[in-house]
Image (tube, helix red, strand yellow):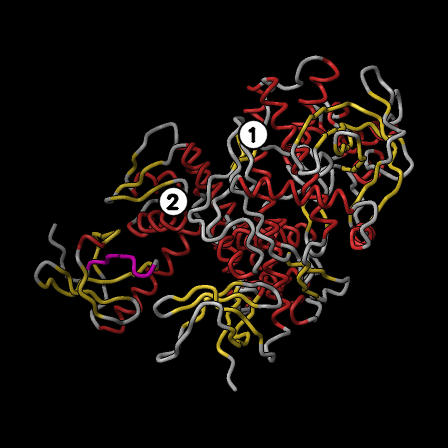
């Protein structure tokens, strides 16, 4: 259709309705005068309404006035249209309407081109109940309308939340009380959203919204969300995000605590049950650190005519915690007690692990006693596993036993037997790797102290005794065909030392070549321990694996059959692995955080390190004081050799960003 000069047309520009008049045609476009006095060339495809009438005015100013009057009149008419009411009236009649036909329904007076244009404006502005397309007005279905209204509602709520969140941030960061208060519900929403972003980063469903909030509030910085929660008192400055990130439970559900309390109350009932041997006359000792409270193993040692009898007595809790109970399921989910520099997260409630089932001095306890007879060279002569009742004669610290060994008193002979036992395992390929342990402690004020602990004779003795009991347990499960869980380890990727090596740096290098341990339902060799098969049963208060293995052995000995079928254990195994993996990640991340925080206070110090490996342009070194491993570029022309002592300084230490970098010390 060819348009003539003076005809009124309307088009959209930047979501605004532009009322214009045709001046002339230029090629395929029309040269138009807009109500704002601009002259533009517009394709006819952009016209949303064309009036058949022309302007009466002839001068430019008069035309502009007439265009503005038309625009004002159409805007007023559009505001009178009740779109929702019109949709209710038309949605069941027909799907497509002309602007004129719909305008005749909307207005009571005679319809003019201005009414048609106003109808189009009302539909486009609302964009919910109707859709304007190619000159016609389409009625939206009820389903589409409901969806659009829900989207609008959510968008309105989102905008309202952003406004409220902005007020909350302003009050929090400036300290000035805002005149417009934020509701507890709005505050809680933003706290939870910011938490989620701190823990999940850009994978959080709130990531975009929280970014918009902080950008609009003018608060920049990668860690502004975390700092906000600290300011709000939600988190502490040293909040352990690893625990939250991996959803580690730090408290116990009510049903778990209820069962734990009941077990604690009944722990002394029928302690001498049928099938349980009275070993209370045996002199039994716990050996642990002075601060330990979850005492699940004790040791006895006696010289006999054929050699020595070593007793490893494990608190027998397995059958007190039946499968498919809240306590058992929770323990499997947790998988292990997590020991962190600033806190301990127990696998079992402390009423059990620290009190009712812990091997306290002078108190009767059910035990699973691993009685092992060895000769003077440490060779195993006989083994027996006994469901028993014991009474710990005395609680000893590692220092107590270290002193006794130094003085060649009571524990000296057992220490020698343990050395012989280790030598036997080394002959079968074991790699003890005597490397000091990193000990990190944090006081109530968040001050960090770090030191290396070299295990003394007592720790070595206890470790060897537990390895012996676990070895016996693995053999028992295998010989009796009892379904169990076994730990194994493939050989190292390379053997660069023998198990007799005691020098620190060769052992550190060998540790870097150790293969990962495995957990499965089949017995396989454990290369690191030099044993043909291995499990763990000696820490049922602290490890779910040990709890399950103990349940299998105790049930077999007392009831003639294992508690779990192989299918049961195969179903439990993924949960155990998941819990152990989460615990390992939490431990690794937490230790790393506190270690980096420790090095924040060491930036001015010169630190000594040993070179472990040398590459073409980089070296790997280990700090002498903490055995922290790091890489360092080698300056051009510098000659570096393995084992060389070097001096470095902390270059960058940012705990929250997991950044720890060292540089060469300058003299």
Decide which of tag 2 and tag 1 comes sooner along the chain.
2
In the rendered image, residue 501, in percent from the top left (x then y), is placed at 55, 54
381 inside magenta stretch? no
In the rendered image, residue 259, in percent from the top left (x then y), is placed at 79, 28
Q: Which residue is mark 1?
A: 573
Residue located at (75% from left, 49% from top): 458
8 inside magenta stretch? yes
> 147 and 75: which one is in front?
147
* Residue 234 can be seen in this image: yes
Left or right: residue 164 versus residue 405 is left
Res 109 label: 2
- Within-10-Å neighbours for mark 2: few <14, some 14–19, many 20+: few
- Within-10-Å neighbours for mark 1: few <14, some 14–19, many 20+: some
Task: Identify the image quadrant of residue 229.
Answer: bottom right
Residue located at (34% from left, 44% from top): 110
> 5 and 339: which one is in front?
339
Q: Main secondary structure of the magenta part?
A: strand
């Amino acid at each position: 259709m060819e348009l003539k000069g003076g005809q009124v047309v309307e088009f959209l520009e930047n979501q605004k309705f532009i009322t214009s008049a045709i001046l002339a045609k230029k090629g395929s476009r029309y040269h138009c005068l807009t109500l704002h006095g601009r002259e533009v060339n517009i394709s006819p495809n952009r016209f949303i309404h064309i009036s058949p009438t022309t302007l009466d005015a002839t001068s430019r100013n008069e035309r502009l006035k007439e265009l503005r009057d038309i625009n004002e009149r159409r805007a007023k008419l559009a505001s009178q249209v009740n779109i929702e009411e019109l949709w209710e009236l038309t949605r069941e009649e027909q799907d497509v309407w002309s602007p004129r036909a719909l305008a005749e329904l909307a207005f009571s007076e005679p319809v003019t081109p201005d009414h048609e244009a106003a109808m189009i404006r009302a539909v486009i502005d609302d964009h919910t109940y109707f859709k304007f397309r190619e000159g016609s007005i389409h009625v939206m279905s009820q389903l589409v309308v409901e969806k659009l209204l829900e989207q609008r509602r959510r968008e309105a709520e989102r905008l309202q939340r952003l406004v409220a969140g902005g007020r909350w941030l302003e009050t929090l960061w400036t300290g000035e009380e805002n005149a417009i208060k934020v509701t507890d519900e709005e505050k809680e929403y933003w706290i939870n959203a910011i938490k989620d972003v701190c823990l999940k980063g850009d994978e959080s469903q709130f990531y975009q919204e929280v970014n918009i909030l902080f950008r609009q509030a003018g608060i920049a910085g990668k860690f502004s969300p975390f700092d906000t929660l600290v300011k709000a008192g939600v988190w502490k400055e040293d909040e352990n995000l690893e625990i939250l990130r991996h959803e580690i439970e730090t408290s116990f559900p009510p049903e778990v605590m209820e069962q734990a309390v009941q077990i604690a109350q009944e722990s002394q009932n029928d302690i001498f049950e049928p099938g349980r041997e009275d070993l209370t006359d045996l002199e039994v000792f716990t050996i642990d650190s002075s601060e330990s409270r979850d005492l699940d193993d004790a040791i006895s040692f006696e010289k006999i005519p054929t050699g020595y009898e070593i007793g490893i007595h494990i608190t027998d809790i397995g059958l007190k915690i039946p499968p498919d109970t809240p306590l058992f399921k929770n323990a499997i989910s947790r998988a292990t007690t997590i020991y962190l520099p600033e806190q301990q997260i127990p696998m079992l409630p402390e009423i059990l692990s620290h009190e009712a089932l812990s091997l306290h001095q002078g108190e009767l306890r059910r035990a699973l006693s691993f009685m092992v007879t060895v000769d003077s060279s440490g060779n195993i002569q006989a083994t027996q596993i006994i469901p028993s009742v014991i009474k710990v004669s005395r609680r000893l610290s590692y220092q107590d036993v270290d002193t006794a060994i130094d003085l060649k008193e009571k524990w000296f002979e057992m220490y020698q037997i343990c050395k012989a036992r280790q030598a036997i395992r080394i002959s079968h390929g074991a790699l003890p790797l005597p490397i000091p342990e990193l000990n990190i402690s944090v006081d109530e004020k968040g001050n960090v102290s770090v030191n290396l602990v070299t295990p003394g004779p007592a720790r070595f003795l206890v470790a060897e005794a537990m390895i012996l009991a676990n070895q016996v347990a693995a053999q028992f499960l295998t010989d009796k065909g009892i379904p169990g869980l076994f730990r194994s380890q493939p050989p190292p990727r390379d053997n660069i030392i023998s198990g007799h090596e005691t020098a620190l740096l060769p052992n550190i290098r060998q540790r870097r070549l150790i293969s990962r341990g495995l957990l499965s339902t089949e017995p396989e060799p454990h290369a690191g321990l030099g044993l043909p098969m291995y499990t763990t049963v000696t820490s049922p208060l602290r490890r779910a694996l040990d709890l399950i293995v103990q349940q299998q052995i105790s049930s077999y000995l007392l009831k003639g059959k294992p508690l779990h079928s192989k299918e049961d254990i195969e179903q439990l195994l993924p949960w155990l692995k998941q819990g152990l993996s989460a615990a390992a990640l939490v431990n690794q991340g937490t230790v790393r955080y506190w270690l980096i925080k420790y090095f924040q206070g060491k930036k001015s110090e010169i630190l000594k390190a040993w070179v472990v490996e040398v590459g073409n342009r980089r070296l790997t070194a280990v700090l002498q004081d903490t055995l922290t491993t790091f890489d360092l570029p080698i300056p051009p022309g510098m000659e570096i050799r393995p084992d060389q002592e070097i001096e470095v300084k902390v270059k960058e230490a940012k705990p929250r960003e997991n950044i720890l970098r060292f540089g060469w010390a300058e003299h």
